[in-house]
């Protein structure tokens, strides 16, 4: 959580083995609910389908690398924008996208 710059918004127990955990980038209205693998999203790892948008992907990638995040697909430039991917400690993949201005 700290490596990506998220802050904890809510953290409440739901049962003895589950909890409701929401995070957000400071100053934004969009929250992400996190769950343990096997409880909220199945037991598989791989591409999550989550893509984080940024206007400055070079800076975003540099910050993530400095924080120790594993970049699994180096930054590329495509006709539709710029793209990179990173993984979390459980090997779930997330995309980073910046539009082609």
Image (cartoon, rainbow, N blue to C red):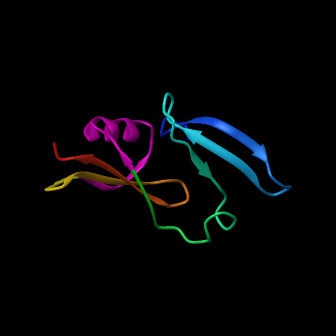
Residues 71 and 55: in front is 55
Figure check: 96 above or below 25: below
Q: Kindly identify the residue that appears in the image at 44 percent across and 37 percent down.
A: 67
Q: Report the front residue among 24 and 65.
A: 24
The C terminus, quarter of image: top left
| Magenta stretch bounds | 52-75
Question: Is 87 or 14 nearer to us in this picture?
Answer: 14
Q: Is residue 27 left or right of residue 16?
A: left
Q: Is residue 36 above or below residue 99?
A: below
57 or 12, nearer to the observer: 12
Q: Check residue 28 for magenta coloring.
A: no
- Residue 76 image offset from top left, x and y in percent: 20, 53
**Residue drawn at 26 percent across, 39 percent down:** 58
Q: Is residue 41 above or below residue 77?
A: below
> Quadrant of the rendered structure where residue 10 is?
top right
Q: Please name the residue shown 28% across and 37% down the image.
A: 55
């Amino acid at each position: 959580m700290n490596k990506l710059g998220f802050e904890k918004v809510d953290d409440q127990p739901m049962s003895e083995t589950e909890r409701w955990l929401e995070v957000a980038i400071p100053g934004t209205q969009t929250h992400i609910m996190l769950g343990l693998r096997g409880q909220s999203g199945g037991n598989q790892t791989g591409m999550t389908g989550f893509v984080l948008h940024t206007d400055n992907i070079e800076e975003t990638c540099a910050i993530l690398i400095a924080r120790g995040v594993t970049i699994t697909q180096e930054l590329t430039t495509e006709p539709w924008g710029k793209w990179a991917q990173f993984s979390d400690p459980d090997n779930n993949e997330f995309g980073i996208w910046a539009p082609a201005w």
